[in-house]
Structure formats: C-alpha cells, structure tokens
Image (cartoon, rainbow, N blue to C red):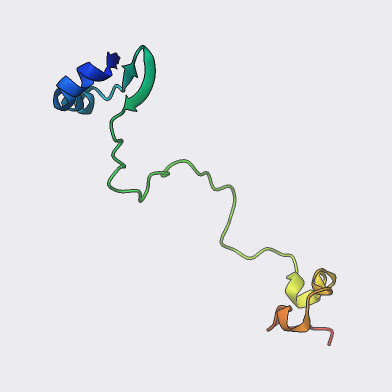
Amino acid sequence: MKITAAEFKAKCLKLMDEISKTHEPIVITKRGKPIAKLVPIEEPSENQFGYMKGTVTILGDVVSPIDEPWSALTGDEDDLYRDLAPDRRPSGGYRENE
C-alpha cells in the first residue's frame, strides 16, 4: 500500500493498528517519491530450543570408538605443529614410541 506523507500524518495511529493486524508494509511517499516504509515488527518465537528437531539424520554408530589410532598418540600429525612456537604447541600428548 502507498500513501502520501500528509495522509500518513493524519491517519498514523490507525495505520499502525492496521499494519499490526495485516502484516503488510506501507510505503509513504512525498511528491510521488517513496521516502519511508512502515513495516510490522516480526516477533521472534518464544522458545528457540528444539526448532531444528527432525532435521538431522544419524547414520551408523556415533558413540562407539573407531578402530583407528588417534594421531595425538601416534604422532602422525606432529609436522602440523612444527612451526608453532614452543609455548603454543599442544601439551599433554602422550607418544607411545618415546
């Protein structure tokens, strides 16, 4: 819906009530050019918890450990940390071959 600024000024409160009911924006014009848009505020849903329920599918067993050695224990990825400063290297790792 388009209305002139003068009409909006005269009917402002009535138009705001109408927008809250219909959720349709109103374009306000001045000398035929759009200058503003009155839009309803979209209320967020009260509870965001669980809004994605049913959108994920789990395939296979995601709880049991896999039969692959952990690279932190085997040292397979040590070359990835070679360029880090000594104080920035991951700590607490255990290597079986040392």
Between 5 and 48, the one nearer to me in the picture: 5
The image quadrant where one finds the N terminus is top left
Q: Residue furthest front?
A: 31
Q: Is residue 82 above or below residue 53?
A: below
x, y (%) of residue 78? 82, 73
The image quadrant where one finds the C terminus is bottom right
Instruction: Name the residue rendered at 75%, 77% in the picture.
Output: 73
Q: Residue furthest bottom?
A: 98
Determine which quarter of the picture holds residue 86: bottom right
Q: Is residue 90 above or below residue 27?
A: below
x, y (%) of residue 68? 74, 65
Q: Is residue 92 above or below residue 62?
A: below
Instruction: Name the residue rendered at 31%, 42% in the picture.
Output: 44
Determine which quarter of the picture holds residue 35: top left
x, y (%) of residue 97? 84, 84
Instruction: Name the residue rendered at 33%, 20% in the picture.
Output: 27
